[in-house]
Image: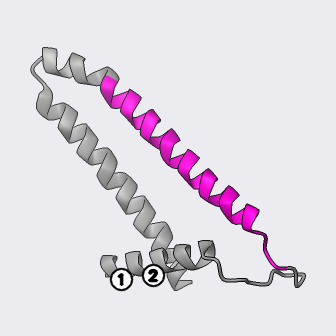
Amino acid sequence: MMLRLLKINLAALLSALSNRQRRGLRGKISPIGGKAGIAALLVFVFAAFLIMFGGLFLSICDAYYSMGLGWLYFAMEAGLVFSLCVITCIFSAQSAVF
């Protein structure tokens, strides 16, 4: 089911960013610049999350390893990744089903 939801969401994203001409609510053709802006926004959000979580885990990595709690570092990282995946799956399924 997870793979099917991923395929549906990826297909929807690619069709929204493709070069097909779609008409908006007022009958105007959506500009290419708007699609490039959305793509740039997605790249910016991805980079912001990468820097945010990278800075968080880089700052606590040395402290945990010096105390001999390397396993706790990886457990925290796995817990965060799992929780983000569950939240993303819930919102994806909700928008696909309803």
Residue 23 quadrant: bottom right
Q: Position of residue 28 (x, y in %)?
A: 87, 80
Label 2 crowd bin: few (<14), some (14–19), many (20+), radius 10 Å = some
Q: Position of residue 89 (x, y in %)?
A: 41, 68
Pick whichever, 45 or 82, lies toward us: 45
Query: Residue 87, which numbered label?
Result: none
Quadrant where the image shows the N terminus: bottom left
Position of 78 compared to 46: left or right? left
> Which SS does the magenta portion mostly show?
helix
| Residue located farthest toward the left when viewing the structure as drawn | 68
Q: Residue at x 45, y 34 (%)?
A: 51
| Magenta stretch holds residue 53 | yes
Q: Which residues are magenta?
A: 29-58
Label 1 crowd bin: few (<14), some (14–19), many (20+), radius 10 Å = few
Pick whichever, 8 or 89, lies toward us: 8
Q: Residue at x 19, y 40 (%)?
A: 75
Q: Which secondary structure, mark 2?
A: helix
Query: Residue 8, which numbered label?
Result: 2
Q: 70 above or below 45?
A: above
User: Label 1 near label 2: C-beta < 8 Å?
Assistant: yes
Q: Position of residue 83 (x, y in %)?
A: 35, 53
Q: Which secondary structure, mark 1?
A: helix
| Magenta stretch holds residue 11 | no
Q: Residue at x 27, y 46 (%)?
A: 79
Amino acid under disc 1: Arg
Pick whichever, 22 or 48, lies toward us: 22
Q: Which residue is mark 1?
A: 4
Q: Position of residue 71 (x, y in %)?
A: 12, 34
Q: How is the image coloured?
A: one colour
Position of 25 compared to 2: left or right? right
Q: Residue at x 39, y 75 (%)?
A: 6
Amino acid under disc 2: Ile
